[in-house]
Amino acid sequence: MDIFFAGTPNSAAEILKSLASNSLFNIKGVITQPDKKGKRGNQRIESPVSLMANSLKIQTYKPNNLTKEHIQNDIDITNADILLVVAYGNIIPTWILESNIKAINIHYSLLPRYRGASPIQSSLLNNDKKTGVTFMQMSEDLDAGKVIKCFEVPINKNDNKSSLEKKLTKLSILNLEKVIADFYSNKIIPVDQDHEKASYCKKILKEDSIINFNESAEKIFAKFRAYNEWPGLCFLHKNKVIKIHGLEVSSTKSSGIPGDITSFTNSGLTIKTIDYDIVITHLQFPNKNIITVKDAYNSYRKFFV
């Protein structure tokens, strides 16, 4: 079976690696985002999928867009049986979707819930008990195509964006061969989504990292889990942005002004919220290394007290 693959981040790279190891599939080419400019000189940063494709010696294309006029002389995407898309980062245009190729998207939510670019973070922000992956037949509208197959996975209370993404990637890889093969041979009939139940992800911004202590401790902890990779979770103290790398919710109810420090010991920096205290166990000052609260207590006690 001839396949074109489109993807960009680490999760997509792992799926590409699994795809390439399967003799059922012949990967004709990989499409990924163009290299990014590095911070130093002319340094270029390749996407994880680009790096994986190169290691597998698979032809890689990095077009700025997928308009027919832009790529038709370089990439014959439609000359394949399947186009598999995993977090590519661009909309697949109509001219490809209307060709003879069967376009499949792997989306990290149980559609129609959480259409859009941040489904993992959304499930954590909402304290969902489960999520999953959806193999979807692609359409012109965002994540609105017919569902080929869904697979569920529980969300543990200590899961964060990183750990949950790994779970969903493993779940995708586990079911990859059978779903693609059955869909290609028409053994699976895709079904319409219930569009009335559709929900959409919010766009995550850098400023979302700053804690609002007038929110509940549970909501703050949900953001800590959802934003652990980017943008992280921070708080302001004496005009410095302190990044949090370890956080717990206390059983002690807050009394007083949200944001005030309740206590600072070598086991935790405790801060009031609108309902329960939160306890910071690991933190990071600007341009410094991550430290334990014990080290912070020894070195920065006067700063917090």
Image (cartoon, rainbow, N blue to C red):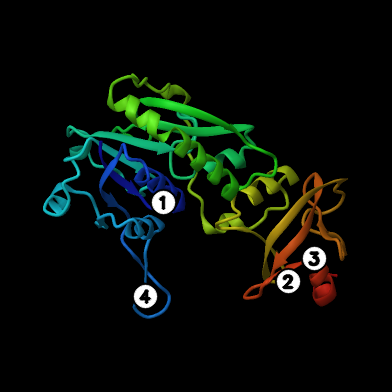
Q: Quadrant of residue 147?
A: top left
Q: Earlier in the sequence, mark 3 or mark 2?
A: 2
Q: Nearer the viewer, mark 4 or mark 2?
A: 4
Residue 145, horizontal then vertical, whole percent: 34, 29
Disc 1 crowd rating (10 Å Cα; few below 14, some 14-19, many 20+) is many
Q: What amino acid is labelled 1 in the image?
A: Ala
Q: Position of residue 37 (x, y in %)?
A: 36, 70
Q: Where residue 66 appears, x then y in whole percent? A: 22, 49
x and y percentages locating residue 4 in the rendered image: 26, 44
Q: Residue 293 shows which numbered tag?
A: 3
Residue type at mark 2 is Lys
Vertical side of 5 occupied by 152: above or below: above
User: Which callout, 1 or 3, points at the residue further toward the start of the chain?
Assistant: 1
Which tag is nearer the camera, tag 4 or tag 1? 1
Question: Whole-Å distance between the Cαs marked 4 and 2?
Answer: 36 Å
Please, is residue 11 above or below residue 154 in the view? Answer: below
Residue plotted at (28% across, 51% down): 31
In space, the residues marked 1 and 3 are separated at their CA atoms by 36 Å
* Residue that mark 1 sits on: 13
Residue for badge 2? 238
